[in-house]
Amino acid sequence: MLIVKEIAELQNLIRKEKGLGNSIGFVPTMGALHAGHLSLVNIASKQTDFVVASIFVNPTQFNDKNDLANYPRKLDSDLKKLEETSCKLVFAPEVSTMYPKEDNRQFNFGELETVMEGKYRPGHFNGVAQVVSKLFEMVTPDKAFFGLKDFQQLAVIKAMVKQLKLPVEIIPCPTMREHDGLAMSSRNQRLTDEQRKNAPHIYKTLVEARNKASEISVEELKVWVSQKIDENVFLETEYFEIVDEEQLKPISSWDEPVNKVACIAVFCDKIRLIDNIAIQ
């Protein structure tokens, strides 16, 4: 497995692989890797010939400076984990490499960026679009792989690819979960033992909500989920929304002819966890 930090070296290696006729798969990450990330690499290796992963904690997508400062950084252990997968190349640039000058681009994703994560993390998706578009231009992948846990991010990246007419296929991949249902996340590493014991209550509540959807209205279910989460003293609901899976528009009735996804953000003390589940 090759490890590079500079753009020119990255692009030379990828040109070589493309010259050999190999397709490029790409898994962008912010490090602190877990089995969910590694599953993306494995899926990529089944669909493409040469898998590239990036490790870069992107400062422009953090609207909370403390969150950026506390985000786990474990490059050495991340590289060891990737060595045990089918990853062929890791791009681990410095901030100065990715942003030699300030990126002032402003994207417009309409309602995609004003609800849920966009509402509570202003500027977040613009930062995501900045870094992912830069990475796509550097890596020039044929396919890029993203987990469904970050459901809204996936919708935004698809919209960005369409807006910029980038020649890359976005592949959604299943959310990986711990044995007790908690969605795998780098942020889970910051949970105390007691918080970790209570965090699975989030997914358990989502499953119960899916089962209750046929019994009560959309608004009643939203109230029920928030109350159920907040009953746990370790957890506090930031938002719970039920949206259509394409445009992420909040729905008001189960009769609406769209595929519905329930999305949630919960604070476990100061650690913010997100999850989602298909309803119908």
Image (cartoon, rainbow, N blue to C red):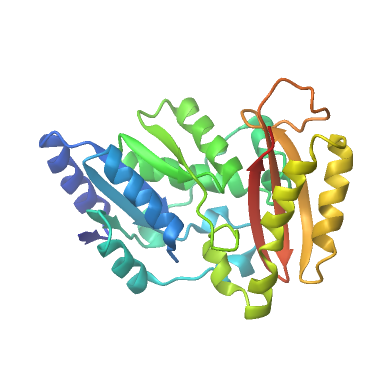
197 or 133, nearer to the observer: 197
Instruction: Pick the quarter of the image with the C terminus.
Output: top right
49 or 124, nearer to the observer: 49
Percent from the top left, x then y, of residue 276?
Answer: 64, 46
Q: As displayed, is residue 20 above or below residue 203?
A: above
Q: Residue at x 52, y 59 (%)?
A: 59
Task: Look at the image and tell me whether residue 11 can be seen.
Answer: yes
**Residue 70 left/right relative to 217:** left
22 or 193, nearer to the observer: 193
Percent from the top left, x then y, of residue 254?
Answer: 79, 28
Percent from the top left, x then y, of residue 118?
Answer: 68, 44
Q: As displayed, is residue 165 above or below residue 130?
A: above
Instruction: Pick the quarter of the image with the N terminus.
Output: bottom left
Residue that protrudes farthest toward the top in the picture: 257
75 or 51, nearer to the observer: 51
**Residue 27 left/right relative to 204:** left
